């Protein structure tokens, strides 16, 4: 595997984002042959709360905890971020950073083959039944039209590839962890594939695959993904957070909402109820941390 110059994120943010995007494109794996009818067009899908309910890295952490490969304290920290994500429908930079550090600490010294096997097991066990069928149907429409369909996500590229492969998509762009001789070093290549880095990855992949971004589509739930959504000519909001919903309406973007029943919790939850639900999530996390400390 080619090793790119490593940055721990303390340097220039734009440079880190561009490096992460280039690394994701370089590590991309095409699972299906290039489509013939429309080879210059593609669709790019975010994963968390766009394709899958909740945060994929949290579901992965749950799978690790179930296999006793992750501590209760680590899972508690993930749970706090997940509780906030589910209540507010928004990503949080601090939670993302916590998830990154925990994930890097876990993979350091492990082999790529071991992680891939875990990703396969945990996807089948914890994630397969959390796929939004409506979003998958959107992806299949692009495939039926002869277009490539790529996942673009901050989750580790190994897990993103498993999700893509299981759903029959073209491939995945995800966060790339540095390896040496097939073993993870505990460092990232560039930074998380998040925000501007996603747009960088899309542009780099388009150049590599000969895609015309003016004919491409992108789908996301998060306002944080505006760089990716505006990198193409056909942006879509899926299960959007409040800011993205407003932006989509102002700009006439299609809005797809596949949440049913309690989906209003994500977009119109009364402030008091939202605070109560978040407090409940925090309390659960604190209880887990106390349990771990007292063991």
Image (cartoon, helix red, strand yellow):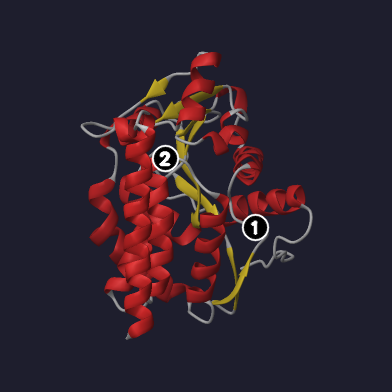
Judge from the rendering whether residue 140 lies leftward or rightward of residue 6; answer left or right.
left
Crowdedness near tag 2: few (<14), some (14–19) or many (≥20) residues, C-alpha within 10 Å: many
Q: Which mark is residue 241?
A: none
> x, y percentage for residue 231?
62, 30
Residue displayed at 60% across by 50% down: 25
* 2 or 1: mark nearer the eye: 2
> x, y percentage for residue 162?
38, 56
Residue displayed at 70% across by 65% down: 8
**Which of the two labelled residues, at mark 2 and mark 1, occupies the earlier sequence position?**
2
* Residue found at the far right of this picture: 12
Q: Is residue 255 visible?
A: yes
**142 w.r.t. 203: above or below:** above
> x, y percentage for residue 272?
35, 37
Q: Secondary structure at mark 2?
A: helix
Q: Which mark is residue 88?
A: 2
Residue displayed at 31% across by 62% down: 284
Q: Which mark is residue 191?
A: 1
> x, y percentage for residue 72?
35, 74
Of residues 242 and 219, the one drawn nearer to the viewer in this rendering: 242
Judge from the rendering whether residue 64 lies leftward or rightward of residue 28; answer left or right.
left
Q: Secondary structure at mark 1?
A: loop
Q: Is residue 57 visible?
A: no
**155 w.r.t. 53: above or below:** below
Judge from the rendering whether residue 46 lies leftward or rightward of residue 9; answer left or right.
left
Q: Work out which quarter of the rendered image holds the C terminus and state it.
A: bottom left
Of residues 177 and 93, the one drawn nearer to the viewer in this rendering: 93
């Amino acid at each position: 595997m080619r090793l790119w110059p490593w940055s721990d994120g303390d340097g220039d943010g734009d440079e880190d984002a561009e490096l992460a995007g280039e690394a994701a494109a370089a590590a991309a794996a095409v699972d299906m042959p290039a489509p013939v009818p429309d080879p210059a067009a593609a669709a790019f899908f975010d994963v968390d709360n766009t394709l899958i309910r909740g945060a994929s890295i949290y579901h992965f952490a749950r799978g690790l905890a179930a296999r006793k490969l992750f501590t209760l304290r680590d899972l508690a920290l993930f749970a706090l971020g997940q509780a906030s994500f589910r209540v507010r429908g928004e990503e949080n930079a601090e939670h993302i950073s916590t998830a990154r550090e925990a994930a890097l600490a876990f993979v350091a010294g492990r082999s790529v083959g071991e992680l891939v096997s875990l990703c396969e097991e945990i996807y089948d066990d914890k994630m397969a039944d959390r796929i939004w069928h409506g979003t998958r149907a959107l992806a299949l429409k692009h495939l039926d039209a002869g277009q490539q369909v790529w996942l673009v996500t901050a989750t580790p590229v190994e897990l993103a590839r498993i999700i893509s492969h299981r759903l029959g998509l073209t491939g995945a762009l995800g966060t790339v962890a540095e390896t040496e001789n097939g073993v993870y070093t505990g460092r990232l290549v560039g930074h998380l594939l998040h925000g501007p880095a996603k747009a960088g990855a899309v542009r780099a992949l388009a150049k590599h695959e000969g895609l015309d971004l003016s004919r491409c589509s992108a789908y996301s739930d998060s306002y944080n993904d505006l760089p990716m959504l505006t990198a193409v000519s056909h942006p879509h909001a899926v299960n959007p957070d409040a800011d993205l919903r407003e932006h989509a309406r102002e700009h006439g973007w299609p809005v797809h909402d596949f949440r049913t029943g309690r989906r209003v919790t994500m977009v119109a939850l009364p402030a008091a109820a939202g605070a109560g639900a978040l407090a409940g999530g925090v309390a659960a996390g604190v209880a887990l941390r106390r349990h771990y400390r007292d063991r």
